[in-house]
């Protein structure tokens, strides 16, 4: 399969995971753009070309972007990058690991990343720039909005809705039919048994707290 060459934005741990997946998928990786790294550095065999200003050297028709920045609760660097880059004419490539199980009817959008060991069931819709991390599962008829982050080992049961910018920590479980509102954060290992309002934080005790004043969103 012939792929459009890609540039990776960011050179940290998530970027290294993506480089491995892209290599297995036989993508041509032109380089990494990361202003925090030194030009000529090598990350998992891929050279750092400089900062985002290097994008001007490429035509939008000849290159696609990969968002290599990971996401942590209350850390909006990934979302900030998307706000800066979406709409500048470049498209983000979607990644689907060879080691993921994804039905043909899965509705995926620009920039979606489905990593190794992930399992997607029938009737799932994945919004633009959402990430299904290593070993996570999304059961039947779930709807994920834009820029949803599903950490490793998460279980999302059937009929769940995750609105834009939701963050699910490692090992979280969302029970059937729940809706998690925009910008909400679910802590690692938490079992969500009821719907979660917009901007809330759910910890291991299933206590709701409003974190919207301390989090920068896409709005």
Image (cartoon, grey):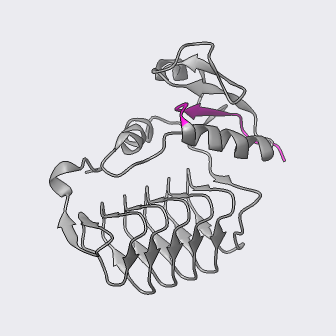
In front: 189, or 12?
Answer: 189
Residue 66 point in image, percent of width and height:
58, 40
Instruction: Name the residue located 58 percent from the left edge and 38 percent from the top edge.
Output: 15
Q: From where the camera sits, is residue 67 visible?
A: no
Instruction: Name the residue located 50 percent from the left edge and 78 percent from the top edge.
Output: 142
| Image quadrant where residue 92 sits | top right
Drawn side of residue 128 relative to residue 75, left or right: right
Check the image and name the residue furthest to the top: 39
Residue 191 vertical placement versus 6 (above, below): below
Residue 130 point in image, percent of width and height:
50, 57
* Tag count: 0
Residue 58 point in image, percent of width and height:
60, 23
Q: From where the camera sits, is residue 138 visible?
A: yes
Magenta span includes 5: yes
Residue 24 vertical placement versus 170 (above, below): above
Drawn side of residue 206 relative to residue 143, left or right: left
Instruction: Name the residue located 60 percent from the left edge and 20 percent from the top edge.
Output: 48
Residue 17 point in image, percent of width and height:
64, 43
| Image quadrant where residue 125 sits | bottom right
Drawn side of residue 203 relative to residue 159, left or right: left
Check the image and name the residue furthest to the front: 205
**Majority secondary structure of magenta residues:** loop
Instruction: Name the residue located 39 percent from the left edge and 49 percent from the top edge.
Output: 72
Magenta span includes 95: no
Check the image and name the residue furthest to the left: 213
- The magenta segment: 1-12
């Amino acid at each position: 399969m012939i792929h459009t060459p890609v540039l990776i934005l960011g050179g940290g741990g998530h970027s290294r995971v993506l480089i491995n997946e892209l290599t297995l998928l036989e993508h041509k990786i032109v380089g990494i753009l990361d202003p925090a790294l030194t030009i000529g550095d090598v990350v998992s065999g891929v050279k750092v070309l400089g900062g985002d200003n290097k994008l001007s050297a490429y035509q939008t028709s000849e290159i696609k972007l990969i968002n290599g920045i990971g996401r942590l609760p209350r850390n909006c660097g990934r979302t900030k990058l998307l706000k800066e880059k979406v709409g500048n004419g470049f498209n983000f490539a979607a990644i689907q690991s060879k080691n993921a199980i994804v039905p043909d009817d899965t509705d995926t959008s620009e920039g979606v990343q489905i990593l190794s060991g992930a399992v997607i069931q029938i009737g799932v819709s994945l919004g633009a720039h959402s990430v299904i991390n290593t070993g996570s599962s999304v059961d039947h008829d779930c709807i994920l909005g834009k820029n949803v982050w599903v950490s490793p080992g998460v279980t999302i049961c059937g009929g769940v809705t995750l609105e834009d910018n939701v963050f699910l920590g490692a090992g979280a479980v969302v029970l059937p039919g729940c809706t998690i509102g925009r910008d909400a954060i679910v802590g690692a290992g938490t079992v969500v048994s009821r719907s979660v309002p917009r901007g809330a934080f759910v910890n291991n005790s299933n206590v709701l707290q409003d974190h919207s004043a301390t989090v920068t969103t896409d709005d």
